[in-house]
Amino acid sequence: MVNAAPENETNEGNEANEVEVPAAVPAAVPAEVSAGPSERLPLQLSRLPADKLMKVHEALMQLQEAGLSEVPDLAGLSKVVKKKTDAGNNARLPFEDLTSEYMSMTLWAWTPKRWFDNVSGSGKAAGAKSEVTEVQAEDTLPPEPADLQKCFEKRIVRFEKWNASKVQEKEKVDIDAFRAWFEVMKKAADEVRSLASMEASQTQAGDDTGVLFEKMPSAGGPRVLPKVKVSGMKEMSCEIHWKTGGKTAKSPSAVISVHLGGEGCDVGLQAWQKYMSEHLLDGSCRPKEGGVYGCSTPLFAESTTGRFIPRAILAGYDGGKLDTISQAGIFAPTSIFTGSRPSDNSWSAGQNDSSFIEEIHESIRRQMEQADYVEGLLFNHGAGEDICMGGVAAALYRKTAEDYSKQLRHSVTCVPDFTGEGDRLACTMLSSPLIEYLDLVTFYDRTSLQKMAHSKVNGLGLASPDYGACTGLAARLLSGITGPLRFGRAINAVEGSRLATWSTDATNLCPYPRIHFMVPSLGGVVAQGMEDFSVPGQAGAEPGFEAAGAALRRGSLSSCISRGDDGKIIAINMFCRGVEQSSVIAKVAEIKTDRKFQFVDWSPTGFAIYSYKDPKCEGPEVAALENNTSVAKIFDSFKSGCEDQQLNSDEGGELAEALENVAGICKDFEEVGAETSYGDEEEDEEY
């Protein structure tokens, strides 16, 4: 009889302190022997890590081989030790063989249950299997097929036969790509197997800190979207070269167009159709000849599918008209807004239509975010068309002035002529926002458009011009003033003009912040059937020479201009497409000697010329913006019939303020056009 432990010591978990064993341990112990009280390790051994238990087990085996026979049931003890050290191959790795520091930190991680069980003296050692995984089967990887390479070669032979039977390239199999894929899969399988077996000789790609800084290859393939610029624009085509005297041109800035009401939406639709034809885009806003012509960034945003989306917003109360525009398929559905007309249809109701105004303003904000840089906002609407829509425009002018004060705000506004029909009250109420919240305002009227459409010289030559023909001339005006931004903004002074931006336009046209009201004109308009007589004058004269003269002499789109009256020119900007710079300069020199053209005496030159040659231009096109003191006549016409209007207290107060502002701006034009007195001793003393 041999005692397994002294009587005064207890072996925790054993049902008896003494075990009777034979003097000699048999070479092979049946399985039944291990199932008994020796299934549990002594407390002293259970506190050892697995690698230390292995050393104890090896020492006991060596002692047994040396002839030690006093240890009871050594084979059962050996099985228990081996079972406890089966926590995984990770536990057998010495510290120096660990593939990463993260592996060494997590190797002996304790679960909360194991921690508290071990503290109480009844748990398993760190690194041993948990109760959940102990009852589960070992995770094993399926063996690698022995004939894997042979099957792969058979598949290659089948692909080669398939390719030989096909004619079109798109139906053939890319064998090289398949081979590369197979090699990648084999390498991945080897890494998975080495990870499962924890081979110390192979370091995984995810180990160590370098994986955080290594550049991973991008995933190619047909489903990956192509990389585009933030602004979504392509470079300009090679037919128009961007030159800045050896310096790199900056990225073109964008202009957001906002078309309000029936007048603005009608002109906007024809203007964008003209933009598309000039940039060689089809009806779905996609390039006709493989690439967009000119620079599309100012007016279009390119999508990832290759479509050029107009940077435009259209809003109004006429749902039928906006539905027709939407069916054209030019504009994004999220940029067309139809408001619900208020019941009283008044100025204050339009200003208080906050939900409609907020929708338009939010769309402007989204357009701002989609562009790299927005240079300005281009508004287009009719002042005397709808008093309720005028209130919406006034509120929108105020919000954009508050939120986008750094962007230039230009409004091309249709006003009633001196004798034509129109809501004078709406024009008068809108005058205050036009004066206070905008940087440039261009006035045109329908009567002047009809005259140009009827004229055979610098006109369309139509006997009875319809609404669409007149609208097309207004669209041509928008195309002309945005032309340098899209086709020639970076041409140097040798080949054209200096850098054309909206800020330079405002600087040239507005000597005083309040005097920012312009009168437009067009030149180079050719009537159908009069192409052979479109260039009158001397034989061999450059077409742009007469086109520039026609824009200044007979191409005005406002009734307030009549050459020879008391109106004086403050400044003129000329936007010339397909015209030689020298021709425009020669015509301007000729006009400055004409007594019909009166200039303010304090303006040294009065002209700013933007000209550029365009190979795609069929003929010379000239648009001009003129700052003339005759604009005061337009404001004078606003006041007629407004003094006796019966309005509520709020609108009455706004009307009184608007009439005061109108009188003030008329006084400003009068002072600007007055003769400057030189050498006046009294003024010198006052100064």
Image: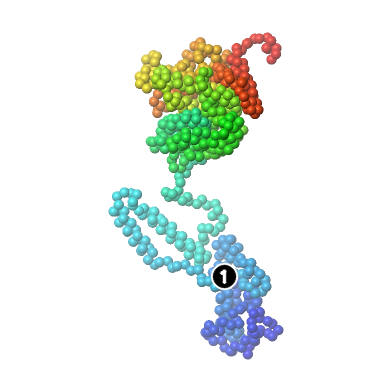
Circle 1 residue: 132
- Taking the spot 39% from the left edge, 14% from the top edge, the residue there is 537
Q: Quadrant of the N terminus?
A: bottom right
Mark 1 element type: helix
Question: Which kind of residue does numbered mark 1 sit on?
Answer: Val
In the image, taking residue 402 as reference, residue 459 lies left or right, namely left
> 186 and 540: which one is in front?
540
* Marker count (numbered): 1
Task: Estimate the x, y position of residue 295 in percent, counting from the top left.
Answer: 46, 33
Q: Is residue 388 visible?
A: yes
Q: Residue at x 29, y 53 (%)?
A: 164
Q: Nearer the viewer, residue 195 or 312?
A: 312
Residue at position x 54%, y 38% from top? Answer: 363
Is residue 291 something that shows in the picture?
Answer: no
From the top left corner, tell me how far across and down residue 146 is, in percent: 39, 67
Q: Quadrant of the C terminus?
A: top right
